[in-house]
Amino acid sequence: MISVIIDSREQKPYSFASCEYIDDIIVRKLDTGDYSIDGMEDLLCIERKMTVSELAMCLTKSRFTRELERMTNYKYRYLLCEFDYYHIDVYPENSDIPPQQRKKVKIKGPFIRSKLIEITMQYGVNIILCGNHSYAEDITATIMKKTWERENGKNKNT
């Protein structure tokens, strides 16, 4: 059974209610990322972005760059996004930005795509575009399960 750590600054954390292999949720500050496993905080880092707007805002901030640099120290590092490529391609259309302000947005889909590729190449971060909140929660739980199994020598082929 896995004890999940959720960063105390996470705004709308996953509940993991449907995950039978997660037996405890601990809320405490993580130095890097939003989710990890108790006892494996130095191995697994999962950063979550809920919207393209949130990701776009982070891509130009030095704070996010420092987080990516810290992530290179982790064996397992992920950026999970609760949206898909379509939402990146049409950004800022169909975003949470008010329609009258979308023309002022300087960051567009091609820039975001380029930065995501750069993040993978430069920092070795696995980026998973999950499509929605529910899939992102399931994928987060699966990553934690597979990490726990791998690090504990169980079910290496599953």
Image: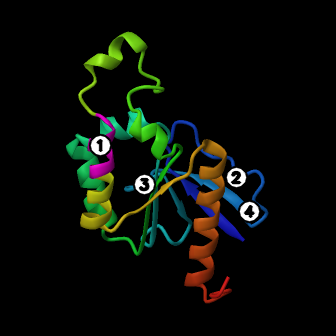
Q: Residue at x 56, y 74 (%)?
A: 147
For the residues labelled 2 and 4, the Cα–Cα distance comes to 10 Å
Q: Which mark is residue 110?
A: 1
Q: How is the image coloured?
A: rainbow
Q: Residue 107 or 66: which is nearer the viewer?
A: 107
Q: Residue at x 50, y 40 (%)?
A: 50
What amino acid does circle 4 point to? Asp
Q: Say if 110 sits above or below 120 in the image.
A: above
Disc 4 target residue: 23
Disc 3 target residue: 33
What is the quadrant of residue 133 in the picture? top right
Q: Which residues are magenta?
A: 108-114
Q: Position of residue 29 (x, y in %)?
A: 45, 50
Q: Earlier in the sequence, mark 1 or mark 2?
A: 2
| Mark 4 or 3, closer to the camera | 3
Q: Residue at x 57, y 37 (%)?
A: 12
Q: Residue at x 44, y 73 (%)?
A: 43
* Side (left or right) of 46 relative to 103: right
Q: Is residue 93 magenta?
A: no
Disc 2 target residue: 16
Q: Position of residue 86 (x, y in %)?
A: 48, 41
